[in-house]
Every structure is written in structure tokens, then in C-alpha cells.
Image (cartoon, grey):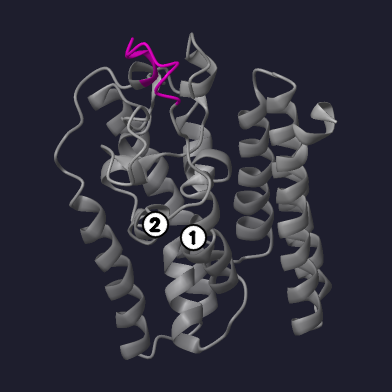
Amino acid sequence: MKTWKKYLVPVIFLVVFETVAVTLWLANDNLFYLFNFTYIGVSIALGVFLYIRKYRHARRIVQLLVGLYMLVYLGLICNENMQIEGFWYYLFTGVFEAATIHYAVAKIVGPLLFGRGWCGYACWTAMVLDFLPYKTPQGPRKKIGWIRYITFAASLVFVGALFLAKAGNMERIMFWAFVIGNIAYYGTGIALAYAFKDNRAFCKYICPVTVFLKPASYFALMRITCDQDKCISCGKCKRVCPMDVDVTDNSRKRKNGTECILCMECVKNCPKDAL
């Protein structure tokens, strides 16, 4: 019975994503949604299963399966802009598909369930940045998180200006915005990682998507919690956390609480299994 229970989490993920897949398939009469969300659900469930089996690279496998699928297949092959510009584009055109559905599921409603899990397991930008050498921050967190609001506003202004100017061939513009945007994201992310000695510097200070993710993450159902009776206050969890989260504090207001990407590094490194 205990063996079965420990695999309940990947089953729940699979059921949730399959429910979304079937619902969108039937509502839109489009098999793509069945394939898309089934693929993502199976990938995430596989990663959680491998993590339970203590496979070292479980999270990286999910990152590659989901990240490459969204970057290469959806973005470059299907010409869907899955960046925030694509969300604004579909929102302004009043079409509830592609990036709009992606943002609604993964980045607006989804964080209420799994917080910033998107950042840890599916983001194609972080997929690359996590391979850089500074997996844990080498210095204190910078107080420049306000930059993310500028990039968020800039993406909105960019798409809004295109609509006001009545630009032609908008879908082609969105495709090239996706290509150029990703090049800029990777370039900036890698430069910041080496400048600050922190792989996740881009996520902390620049990424505009976090403006959506952070508020809902405050209320996330899935959270890392600490058993205060087992905790010996060794501080190891704080040292290995790539996002500077104080996981020993179980309150919603804990330091950098909405930054947790559920990477589970703190859990794996806790010497007393207190997390």
C-alpha cells in the first residue's frame, strides 16, 4: 500500500493534464489539444516518477522533453509564438488558443496548484541556463527585480503598437518576434549568469512571465514545507536553493516564497529529511 501511495503524485499530474487535454479537445474539436497536453502531462508524470525512484537527472529530463517540444515544435516548426508577446497577440485578437491557452493553464491558473513549477520543469529558457556552472548563487540576491516589470510592460507596448499601427502579416511578425526574443533571452540569461555567478539571475530579475507567476504562487497548494521537529537549522537547504527561498519558514510570507521552482534540491540535500 505504501509503495502505491508514493506514486500518487505523478498519477495526479497525469490525470490533471489529461482532463485538460480531453476538455480542450472536445471544446475546440481539435486533436492537437489532446496530443499537446497529454504529451506534457506524460512528460511531467515521468519526471516525478523518476524523481521518486531517486534518478539524479529526473528534472532535467522533463525540462528537455517539454522545453524542446515547446521551443522547436510549437515555436519554430508550428510558428506559434509561445513567449509573452504571443499571449498579448492572441488576447488582442480575441482568440482563445495557442499561447492564450498555454498562459491560462501553465502561468495564470496552474500556479495556484503547483506554484512556479513551470520555471523548474518546462521553461525552455531555464532549460539552457540550468546547464551553466553556477547552479547555486555565489553572492547575495540583487535588488533589481523591478526590471521584470519593465520587460513585461515593453512586451505589451510592443504588441499594442503593432495593432495600433495596423501592421500587416502579424503572424509572421510574431514568429520573428519569437525567434529574436529567444535569442535575446538566451544571450541576456547567459551573460547575467556569468556576471552574477547565478544561473537563475535572468529568472529573478528580467523574465516578464514571473509577473503572472508570482501572485498565484503565493497561494500554491504544492509547497515545500519544513518539519520543525526534525530541522537542525544547518542552513544547507538555503545554500543549495537556486532561488534563495527560506524553506525552513512554513508561512506564506517566507523570504522569496513566490520564487520556489520546486526543483527539490533542498529536499534532496536535507541531512535530516525535514523537508
Q: Residue furthest left?
A: 143
Q: Amino acid at mark 2?
A: Val
Give whichever of discs 1 and 2 has the lower sequence position: 1
**Magenta region, residue range:** 227-237
Q: Where residue 39 appears, x then y in whole percent?
A: 77, 52
Residue 156 highlighted magenta (yes or no): no
In screen coordinates, is 109 left or right of 54? left
Q: Where residue 205 appears, x then y in whole percent?
A: 26, 44
Residue drawn 30% across and 24% down?
194
Residue drawn 47% across and 81% down?
91
Identify the element where label 1 is drawn: helix
Does 61 sit above or below residue 217?
Answer: above
Instruction: Give the main secondary structure of the magenta stretch.
Output: loop
Nearest to viewer (mark 1 / mark 2): 1
Mark 1 lies on residue: 107
Does 182 sit above or below residue 240?
Answer: below
Residue drawn 48% across and 28% down?
130
Name the quadrant containing residue 248: top left
Name the quadrant containing residue 38: bottom right
Q: Where residue 90 appears, x then y in whole percent?
A: 51, 79
Which quadrant of the figure contains the N terminus?
top right
- Is there any visible trace of residue 187 in the rendered image? yes
Residue drawn 82% across and 27% down?
3
Query: Are there few (<14), some (14-19), or many (20+) residues within 10 Å of tag 1?
Result: many
The answer to whether the residue labelled 1 contacts the one labelled 2, judged by CB atoms less than 8 Å apart, is yes
Q: Nearer the viewer, residue 8 or 130?
A: 8
Mark 2 lies on residue: 209
Residue 233 highlighted magenta (yes or no): yes
